Every structure is written in structure tokens, then in C-alpha cells.
Image (tube, rainbow, N blue to C red):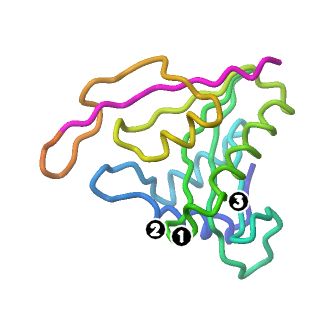
């Protein structure tokens, strides 16, 4: 899926605001562009009003980026801009992602997050459960190590 260049601009704008630099989780523009050139990756955007129909120049509140292989999909990136958090947009976008994964014939969805990621509550509310742990996977600039948690959601297709 080759997105319009302004959609990549939207993704990067949200990523710059939403990902704390100390964890090194954000991707650069080339990584996002390259992922979307591969036929099994897709993305979704959400506007501040909750719609997914954004016009050129509209502000973007959040996005997801995922990769599908056969009947499984991995949520690679998921972000809501800090100024739009706690307004239900994360639930709406994640719900839309899960529904589209089901409609695309996916049986399971996976994600990985750092242990202290506040989005863990959002993922749990949508039925994700922990299936693995990578001890000391993330490293902060101070040298502190943080575990990565692997999660799964069975879609029941």
C-alpha cells in the first residue's frame, strides 16, 4: 500500500508528538515509507472528531500501522497525539483496526509494548492478553532496562 505523501506526513506528526524519545520506539520516515511499500502492511488514521475521512490539511489525532502474514496481523505502531488522549479516540481506532483485521480474515492479532506503557489498559480493554516477555528489551538513555510484553488477541474467525 503506497499512501499519499501527506498521509505519511500525518503519521510522522503524530509519532513525533506521541512517542517519548527516551524509549526509542518511534520510527523514522523511511522506515514507515518502506513498510508501507510492502504489500502486507497497512495503516489507518483517525481525525480529532473520530472520523477516518480526512481531507488534505486536516489535523490527524492518531494512527496505526500493521503487518499481516497469512491469517495473523501484528500491530507495529499505534499512537494517539497527547492532546487528543482520553477522548475515546484510542478505543475507536483500536476497535476499527480489530474489526478490519477480522474482516480481512485474520485469526489473531499480536503486539509488543514496553512494560510501563500506559496503553496497556487500552489493549486489555479490547481483549489482548500477555503471551510472552522479553526481559530488559528496551533501554533508556540513563541505561535503565525495561521489559517488552508480547500480547495476543484471538479473533475467533
Q: Quadrant of residue 70?
A: top right
Which stretch did the figure color magenta? 145-157
Question: Which residue does the image show at 71% across and 36% down from the upper left?
Answer: 40
Q: Can you tell which mark lies on residue 27?
A: none
- Give the numbered dot on residue 17: 2
State the count of labels. Answer: 3
Report x, y in % for residue 7: 68, 66
SS at circle 1 = helix
- Position of residue 91 relative to residue 138, above or below, is below
- Front-most of residues 126 and 27: 126
Q: Are marks 1 and 3 in contact (CB under 8 Å)?
A: no
Alpha-carbon span between mark 1 and mark 3: 12 Å
Between the residue at mark 1 and the residue at mark 2, the CA separation in whole angstroms equals: 7 Å
93 sits left or right of 26 in the view: right
User: Which circle's residue, 1 or 3, is located before the other in the chain?
Assistant: 1
Horizontally, residue 51 falls left or right of residue 94, namely right
Q: Badge 1: few (under 14), some or many (20 or more) residues near its Cα, within 10 Å?
A: some
Q: Label 2: how many residues lie within 10 Å, few (<14), some (14-19) or many (20+)? A: some
**Percent coordinates x, y for residue 59 in the rendering:** 66, 77
Q: Which mark is residue 13?
A: 1
Amino acid at each position: 500500500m503506497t499512501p499519499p505523501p501527506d498521509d505519511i506526513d500525518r503519521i510522522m506528526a503524530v509519532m513525533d508528538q506521541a512517542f517519548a524519545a527516551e524509549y526509542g520506539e518511534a520510527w523514522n520516515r523511511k522506515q514507515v515509507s518502506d513498510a508501507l511499500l510492502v504489500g502486507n502492511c497497512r495503516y489507518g488514521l483517525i481525525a480529532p472528531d473520530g472520523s477516518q475521512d480526512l481531507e488534505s490539511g486536516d489535523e490527524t489525532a492518531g494512527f496505526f500501522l500493521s503487518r499481516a502474514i497469512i491469517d495473523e496481523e501484528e500491530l507495529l505502531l499505534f499512537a494517539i497525539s497527547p492532546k487528543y488522549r482520553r477522548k475515546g479516540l484510542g478505543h475507536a481506532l483500536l476497535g476499527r483496526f480489530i474489526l478490519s483485521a477480522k474482516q480481512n480474515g485474520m485469526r489473531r492479532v499480536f503486539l509488543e509494548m514496553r512494560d510501563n506503557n500506559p496503553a496497556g489498559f487500552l489493549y486489555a480493554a479490547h481483549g489482548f492478553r500477555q503471551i510472552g516477555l522479553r526481559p530488559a528489551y528496551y533501554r533508556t538513555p540513563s541505561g535503565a532496562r525495561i521489559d517488552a510484553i508480547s500480547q495476543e488477541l484471538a479473533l475467533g474467525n
